[in-house]
Amino acid sequence: MERITAANNLIIEYEPEHWRLLQNGGGAERVLVETAPDASLRYPGSFGVVYRLPETGVLDSSGVDRVVLGWSAKDQTWHLGLMLDETLAQARGSRWCGLARWNETEPNGATQAGKQLASQIRRPFLLVPPKTAPANSVVAASPAPVRASAPAVEAPVYQPAPQVVDAVPPPALPELPYELDDWRLDRAADGRLLFTLMTSSARRALKALWYALWAVIFVVLSITSLTVNLAPPQPTVLPYIGIVGAVFLLGLAIYTLLRGRNIITRIEVDGVLGVITGFKGNGQAWQYPRNEIKYICFAGGEQGEPSQP
């Protein structure tokens, strides 16, 4: 089995039976893309969202025109990826789907990794090397300087002494885990950042029970005032106000319980895939890829709901 490291903590692993692109974060590896001879490319749903691939998590090899390893002069980096067919290109806006990159001038093993991927999905492999200047190119010579008959006198040029400026180090990041209001920031074993709401559901249930208890007390006092042959309450509308207050408290208790089921309790930030995902309990509520996020703002508010910044 061959393993090749790439930028952003990525690893390409291949052998005759399979080809995989792995993410190595915090000592734990997870599969981003995998395939086998004569099989389709498979990937997690979050990977498909970021790279605008079919949401089924499966890309048939017929949708791949060729596998390309090429040098980009713009960022001085080698890129390995897929050149997709026109049908997928129209849906996603581009034929290119990058998989891995290397900052080295000659990445060790990248060519073989690309050939293995192309061989397993039965598509052609294309190597695009760096462009070199043609051998017969002629460089125009600059004209020779004309020497004056009389010696030139150079005036002294004042050069100020260089100023030494101490480099200001960037502020240190806080140690994790880190608590911010009702939220706790921690890092998972695979490198993801986790924002977790620390307020438990038991606390919300206790609050709802407190409202319900006072609602029962108001109802008992109001009914007792209306049924027991004692001096009528003053004012006489007081028992009815108590019943209205009990209904309000009971509604507040129900609202507290229902609201606890609809707030975001966990936010996951995946730097490798470039997605931010919000969860309500164990269910996913929303997910945004990196290219749809303009900025991130945190402002203190009620539990699970940020206030207006």
Image (cartoon, rainbow, N blue to C red):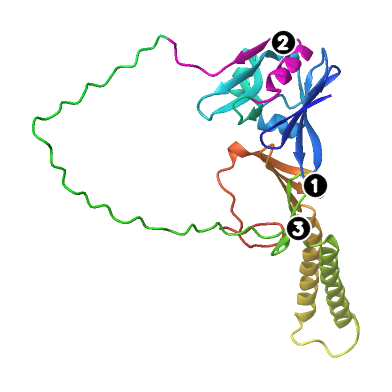
Q: Which mark is residue 123?
A: 2
Q: How packed is label 2: few (under 14 Cα within 10 Å), some, or many (20 or more)? A: some
Q: Which mark is residue 102?
A: none
Q: Quadrant of the C terminus?
A: bottom right
**Camera-nearest residue between 190 and 202:** 190
Farthest-out residue, bottom: 231
Circle 1: element type? loop
Residue 285, picture quadrant: top right
Where 254 falls versus 111 (above or below)? below
**Camera-nearest residue between 262 and 228:** 262
Residue 252, picture quadrant: bottom right
**Camera-nearest residue between 2 and 213:** 2
The percent position of residue 229, horizontal first and vertical second, equals: 90, 87
In whole angstroms, how far apart are the C-alphas of marks 3 and 1? 19 Å
Residue under pointer 1: 189
Counting residues from the N terminus, which is met first, the one under dot 2 or under dot 3?
A: 2
In whole angstroms, how far apart are the C-alphas of marks 2 and 3? 47 Å
What span is colored magenta in the figure? 107-135
Foreground mark, 2 or 3, reads 2
Proximity of marks 3 and 1: CB atoms separated by less than 8 Å: no
**Camera-nearest residue between 101 and 238:** 101
Residue under pointer 3: 197
Residue type at the position of mark 3: Leu
Q: Is residue 217 visible?
A: yes
Residue type at the position of mark 1: Ala
Q: Is residue 248 left or right of residue 79?
A: right
**Could you tell me which residue is drawn at 78 percent across and 75 percent down?**
240
